[in-house]
Image: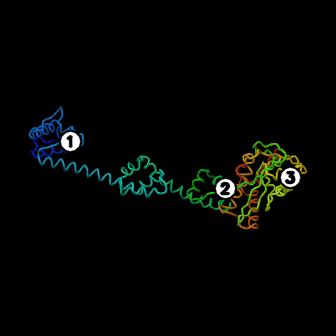
Amino acid sequence: MAMKDYSDEFKADAVALYESTPGATYKDIAADLGINRATLREWVLRDRERRGIVPTGPRAAGTATARAGQPTASDDPEMRIRQLEARVAELEASERKLATERDILRKAAKYFAGGDELVSRFQFVHDHRDTYEVKRLCQVLDLNRSSYYKWLGGADARVVRRREDQVLVEQIRRIHAGSGGAYGSPRVTAELREAGTLVNHKRVARVMRTYSIAGIRLRRRVRTTVPDPAAQAVPDLFRRDFTATEPGRKYMGDITYLPLAGGEFLYLATVLDCFSRKVVGWSIADHMRAGLVADALRMAAATRGGLEGAVFHSDHGAQYGSRAFADLCSGLGVIRSMGAVGSSADNAACESFHASLKRETLQGARDYGGPATCRRTVFAWLTRYNTRRRHSANGHLSPNEYERRHHTAKLTLAA
């Protein structure tokens, strides 16, 4: 029940509270005190009249000053002290707020040293919720509190996912190691699926990124194509179409360098089937004469049991434009095709194949060491490439498996 008679002390305190509260209204202060708004206004006006303060408008001049955030001027020393104390308390509260925010940001700067992701901010709030209010943490980190609590509600699901990731990363490491460190997330995903693990490629990429598991990156190329200005003109029958509907129809070839210790090189010539990207012929030598590419083509003919009617595509290197190589192609019944002079895109599939070979065999090293080591390493990779290495152009099947399934499908249709 509201009081009917108020002591002089109560009235003085009520007036002081109103005068010392920046932006205060009669209604707000009266509600806090449990008195009538008109009663409080009468006390304030009477007090101001006693102190000789005359209103300058419909409201007292002191009210306008309070709105600006400054205490009302007073001739009464005691009232003036109260006003100053209230202002000091306000400033101290503001300073405490700023100090808290600075402290949060300092801790956050260390916490997010590895990158400020949204999940990390949620985790920061969770880790510091006993030190600071969640509301304050979310304000400083520009987070929606409802989003934080939604994240918090998914804690059990995240624990389960982390356990599953631990199992998955061990599988990934085995597959990655088995590829000689060459496989990236697409081939790892294909390997997992074939083993019966149904997993999204994005999840595999995320886990590999989290645990710093990555395929081997490309190395800088060295030019090996030296055109022969006197070579006979050969048309481009591929037109950058490196696909084929059947094995043994279209082949492509190129030469690449193999760096050795001491700045020396071996050279590798390859012949690839456009249908499956299978390496059907190769040759390694310490020179780049026409015999190098001729030996690779002879191996291809032996592997396929003949090349009669097939198209062989190359760049304009002097070896492929030589008379000796042209005679060999004629003898084997091979139709020659060459890309434009100076255009690596016209033999891009071979360029990509050789880049993968060196990326996965050198694995960041500058050279292979001695010639014997180089030959063994490249030979092992070429044979494994055909039998086991997954190729993106084959739907992540090895070249041999891709051709086997093609032949099986043909026999099924014929039956």
Please tell me which residue lies in front, 79 or 75.
75
Please tell me which residue lies in front, 295 or 275.
295
State the residue lying farthest toward the front: 229
* Real-space CA distance between mark 3 and mark 1, rounded to the nearest whole angstrom: 103 Å
Instruction: Name the residue at 42% across, 48% down.
Output: 143
Is 60 on the left or on the right of 330, as rendered? Answer: left
Q: Which amino acid type is marked by label 2?
A: Arg
Residue 340: image x %, image y %?
76, 44
Q: Which amino acid type is marked by label 3?
A: Phe
Instruction: Name the residue at 14% across, 43% down.
Output: 74
* Residue 29, disc: 1
Judged from the image, the secondary structure of the residue bearing numbered disc 2 is loop
Is 390 on the left or on the right of 156, as rendered? Answer: right
Judged from the image, the secondary structure of the residue bearing numbered disc 3 is helix
Question: In terms of image quadrants, where is residue 38?
Answer: top left
Q: Quadrant of the C terminus?
A: top right
Instruction: Name the residue at 80% across, 53% down.
Output: 271
* Residue 191, disc: none
Q: Which amino acid type is marked by label 1?
A: Ile
**N-term mark: 3 or 2:** 2
Residue, disc 2: 220
Callout in the foreground (2, 1):
2
Residue, disc 3: 325
